[in-house]
Image (spheres, rainbow, N blue to C red):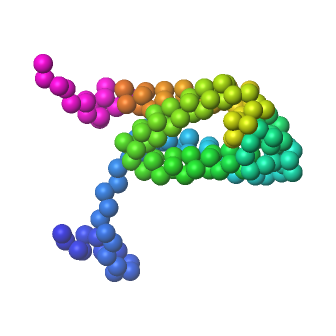
């Protein structure tokens, strides 16, 4: 490689040639979802934004804290949001992992919806804790994440930017 092509004329330093690929929509979706989860995780630890902050427990159904006065939260629940946020940001670095984060993460949130709907708000099994508002949010988050992951795949395939899965011969 010609080093003069990568030499900064004003400083004389040589820079590495880095191929820049534009971010795909699926990566932007994962970045947005990850950022949103991080934001919600942080906001859950801020008194005033989280009402009943002094009544927050580490886990369990008796946490008296409500994010935005609506969504039941605990320390563990906030940590789960932070973890999902970090995973989303990391996954957004590549299209395949971004797609996986959206589809698998969406599936996890749909499972949380089923779990939260099955256990009562005051049952010991409600460890994160969940209330009715959380359950509806988990349903829409899960469905939305899966929809974004699948829609991005369909869009990329229609443009020839994403390979078709291997076909098994007859």
Q: Which residue appears at 77% of the width and 38% of the height?
A: 61
Q: Which residue appears at 29% of the width and 65% of the height?
A: 17
Quarter placement of the C terminus: top left
- 48 drawn magenta: no
Q: Give the total number of marks visible in the rendering.
A: 0
- 158 drawn magenta: yes
Q: Is residue 119 visible?
A: yes
Q: Which residue appears at 74% of the width and 27% of the height?
A: 120
Query: What residue occupies the far top of the structure in this picture?
Result: 170
> In the depicted view, which residue is nearer to us: 34 or 28?
34
Q: Quadrant of residue 136?
A: top right
Left or right: where 26 falls relative to 61: left
Residue 58 horizontal/vertical position (percent):
74, 50
Left or right: where 35 falls relative to 13: right
Residue 48 horizontal/vertical position (percent):
85, 48
Residue 125 horizontal/vertical position (percent):
69, 36
Give the main secondary structure, helix, strand or loop, of the magenta stretch. loop
Give the magenta range. Answer: 155-170
Residue 36 horizontal/vertical position (percent):
62, 43
Left or right: where 84 falls relative to 48: left
Q: Quadrant of residue 151?
A: top left
Query: What residue occupies the far bottom of the structure in this picture?
Result: 12
Q: Which residue appears at 66% of the width and 24% of the height?
A: 118
> In the depicted view, which residue is nearer to us: 101 or 31?
101
Left or right: where 36 falls relative to 63: left
């Amino acid at each position: 490689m010609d080093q003069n092509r990568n030499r900064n004329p004003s400083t004389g330093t040589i820079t590495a040639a880095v191929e820049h690929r534009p971010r795909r929509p699926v990566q932007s979706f994962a970045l947005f979802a990850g950022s949103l989860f991080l934001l919600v995780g942080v906001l859950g630890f801020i008194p005033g934004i989280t009402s009943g902050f002094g009544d927050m427990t580490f886990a369990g159904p008796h946490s008296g804290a409500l994010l935005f006065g609506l969504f039941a939260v605990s320390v563990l629940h906030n940590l789960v949001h932070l973890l999902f946020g970090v995973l989303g940001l990391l996954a957004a670095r590549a299209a395949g992992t971004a797609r996986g984060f959206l589809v698998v993460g969406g599936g996890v949130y749909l499972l949380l919806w089923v779990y939260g709907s099955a256990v009562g708000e005051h049952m010991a099994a409600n460890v994160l804790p969940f209330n009715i508002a959380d359950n509806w949010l988990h349903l829409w988050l899960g469905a939305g994440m899966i929809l974004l992951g699948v829609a991005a795949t369909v869009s990329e395939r229609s443009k020839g930017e994403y390979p078709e899965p291997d076909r098994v011969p007859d």
